[in-house]
Image (tube, helix red, strand yellow):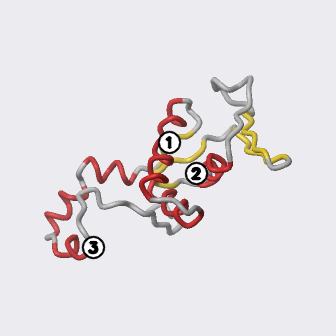
Amino acid sequence: MKEYKGPEYHFVCSPGGLSGNELAKLSDDELTRYLNQDSYLQEKKKYRIRSGYILREIAGEYAIIPVNVDSVFSNALMAPNETAAFLWNAFQKPSTIQDVVMRGLLEYDVAEEIIRNSVENFVKQSLEYKIIEEVE
């Protein structure tokens, strides 16, 4: 028997720039090759905040507190701004970068390129500090 996983879907950019109509016209072999491109596989990666961190809002200010975690921040707090707190909350459950970009576009009046750069930088820095993890 297969392991049951609850239904979910994620937004994934078409890294080759093909539209939905163009993708639909590809043969099965062509679509398989397209979906196995490294750039597409990168877009499918999901990330989430590692356990052991708590985000608190106190009097309009945010604090991220490491709890029982081996981290470079184990003796410090992080003080994110409102946008960083939004990204933190967005990655509480496994999400692709594009998932969070789409949520950001619904939340903020900003160009997609700006929110994408912010999300990508957040993920990159959070991976370096081992605050976020890649999940399947």
Within 10 Å of the Cα at label 2, are there few (<14), some (14-19), or many (20+) other Cα atoms? many
- Residue at the disc numbered 3: 20
Cα separation between marks 2 and 1: 9 Å
Within 10 Å of the Cα at label 3, are there few (<14), some (14-19), or many (20+) other Cα atoms? few
Residue 70: image location, x then y, percent:
65, 25
- Residue at the disc numbered 1: 123
Residue 23: image location, x then y, percent:
22, 70
With 98 as the anchor, is 16 left or right in this view? left
- Residue at the disc numbered 2: 91
Residue 10, picture quadrant: bottom left
Which residue is painted at 63% across and 53% down in the image? 86
Asked if labels 1 and 2 touch by Cβ distance under 8 angstroms, the answer is yes
Q: Secondary structure at mark 1?
A: helix
Which residue is painted at 49% across and 53% down in the image? 115
Q: Which is nearer the N-term, disc 3 or disc 2?
A: 3
Q: Secondary structure at mark 3?
A: helix
User: Measured along the vertical axis of the image, is residue 56 above or below residue 7?
Assistant: above
User: Measured along the vertical axis of the image, is residue 33 above or below residue 22?
Assistant: above
Residue 89: image location, x then y, percent:
64, 52
Within 10 Å of the Cα at label 1, are there few (<14), some (14-19), or many (20+) other Cα atoms? many
Nearer the observer, 61 or 28? 61
Which residue is painted at 23% across and 51% down in the image? 37
Q: Which kind of residue does numbered mark 3 sit on?
A: Gly
With 65 as the anchor, is 135 left or right in this view? left
Asked if labels 1 and 3 touch by Cβ distance under 8 angstroms, the answer is no
Q: Which kind of residue does numbered mark 1 sit on?
A: Val
Q: Which is nearer the N-term, disc 2 or disc 1?
A: 2
